[in-house]
Structure formats: structure tokens, C-alpha cells
Amino acid sequence: MAFTAQDVAKLRALTGAGMMDCKNALSQTNGDMDKAAKYLREQGINIAKKKEGRIASEGIVSAAVSANGKIGALAEINCESDFVAKSAPFIELCETVAKVVVKQNPQDIEALKAEKTADGTVLDSINNATAKIGEKLSLRRFARQEIKCGLQDFYLHMGGKIGVLLEVETGKDINKDKEFTAMFHDVAMHIAAYPVEFISDKEIPASEIEEQKSIFTKQVLNEGKPAAVADKIVAGKLKKYFAEICLLEQPFVKDPSVTVGKFVEAAAKKFGTDIRISRFTKFTMGEGLEKKTDNLAEEVAKMQNK
């Protein structure tokens, strides 16, 4: 089957592959458009494997929420450069993956890679994007939260450098109330801005509290404070420590005159129902990953030797 320049252009628009790659694919498949697209996907797998050893420490955290607001997800995909992380094809890929997590509820990364997308599977989508973008792409992690009565909302900071998924349990369904959703979107923003580790001190393991108490006690005694007042000082230090890491004890970012806990109490009174922050997930893009280091002098030397 013969093919034309228009066929090459059509395949390029369909797959995002280069012009010569599309021409070669059509040649290899005797002009069959569907087979050529499959051939390019197969080449994309090869391209992806060639890039496995490279460092992907940039990227974004993406998010999605179901139409009824009761299911939410975060997904982090990494790439090699910040330039690619800001590109439309990469952002679209990340958003697609987050939506798949919401819809399909995969149990782990491998299950997520096998879920269906318009390109075949999530793994096919990643490999196709790798071939199109030209960088190693890595699906690193995801989180999914679902609630029977309440709200899932997300906040993405700096284009996805930080992603927060917030779950708010309510006594009645008020997810269609724009004021309610706006108020707790601000709480999600607060979690992105503050070093939040727990919702309240009730979540802190007893062993961690005892360890911190021991540290504060030694500090107080080393400062020469009388043993008679040491317990009172330690209690004050613990309260301050809880306020630093527990969401409900922190000054609310939109109104520091009240804590987040008091803000939630006021919201419950305002909407006439029980409201409780039940959980949250916070991803900071690239945390714990090996970072790529560029040596400009070496790059220039390589170019001159070519």
C-alpha cells in the first residue's frame, strides 16, 4: 500500500513522532496507518528502555477529583528537565494518569501502568510520551482517597511542585455549596504552605511524644532550670511542638488570628453539620530523589570534540 506526504503528516499529528520516524513506520508497515502507529509505540518502548539509566528528578504532581467530589487522587511523574515539566504534553500525561487513578482505583504502580487509556495502557502513554518528548519519564507514586459523605479537594503549588489532597468528612452532603468548597480549598493551600505532619496530636505515636518529651526535659535541666518547674516548661514546649506539626493547632494561613481547628469549628456551625478533617496526602515533587548535576565545561568540551 502506497502512502503520501499527507499520510506522514497525519501519522505525525496522531502520534507526535518525528517526520522521518513516521515515514519509516509507514514504510515498514506498507502504508497501514494503524499498524504504523503501533510500530511507533513499539519503537517508543525501545526508546524508553534506552533512557532507563538516566536521572529523572524533575516533574510535577498532578491531581484529579471525581464529579461528585468524593474521590480524589494525586500522581507524581518525573522527567529529566524543568523545561519538559512545564510542557503541555507532559502536563497532559500527568493529568491523564491522575484521572485514571480516580476512576480505576489501582492497588500499586504496576497495576496502574496496566490500566487502560486512549493510547492503550498507562505504560503505553508513558512510552509514547517518552518517544515524543525525548526524556526519561518515570511514574513514581500515587495516592487515592475516597469518602462516603464529604469532600476531596486538592491544591497544587507552583505548577505541581507540591500537591495536597485533602479529605473533609461532613454530616450531610454539602459538596455543591461553593462557599464550603472554597473554604476547605484554603485549608488544602494551608497544608501546602506549612510543615504539616499530623492532623492533631492524637495521631502522633506515643513513642515519638515520649522521645520529644525526654529531649525537652534534658534541655530544660541543662539550662539550669529547677526540677520543680521543669515539668511545666516541658509541657509548654510540647504544646509549641504540636502546633508546629499538627494541622488543627496551626495558625490558619488565611487568618492567623484563629487556628485551623477553630476555623473548622466555625465552618461546622455555619453549615449546620458535623465537619471533620479526616486525612490528607502531601507530595513534594522529587523529595528523596537523586538530582541531576550539570557540568557546563564538560558539555562544551564534548561538543568541541564531536
Image (cartoon, rainbow, N blue to C red):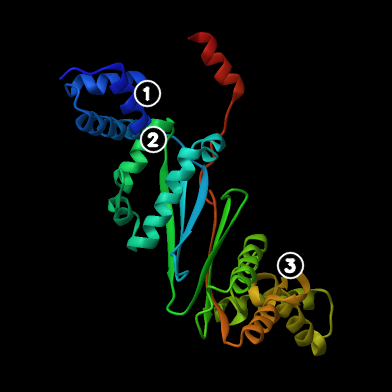
Q: Is residue 51 visible?
A: no
Q: CA distance from mark 2 to mark 3?
A: 41 Å
Who comes first in sequence, dot 2 or dot 3?
A: 2
Residue annotated with mark 1: 18
Query: Please, what secondary structure does the residue beneath circle 2 have?
Result: helix
Residue annotated with mark 3: 254
Q: Quadrant of residue 68?
A: bottom left
Q: Quadrant of residue 206?
A: bottom right
- Tag 1: amino acid: Gly
Q: Which mark is drawn over residue 260?
A: none
Residue at 82 percent of width and 87 percent of height: 229
Who comes first in sequence, dot 2 or dot 1?
A: 1
Who comes first in sequence, dot 3 or dot 1?
A: 1
Q: CA distance from mark 2 to mark 1?
A: 12 Å
Q: Is residue 271 above or below residue 144?
A: below
Residue 288 percent across, percent down from the top left: 52, 51
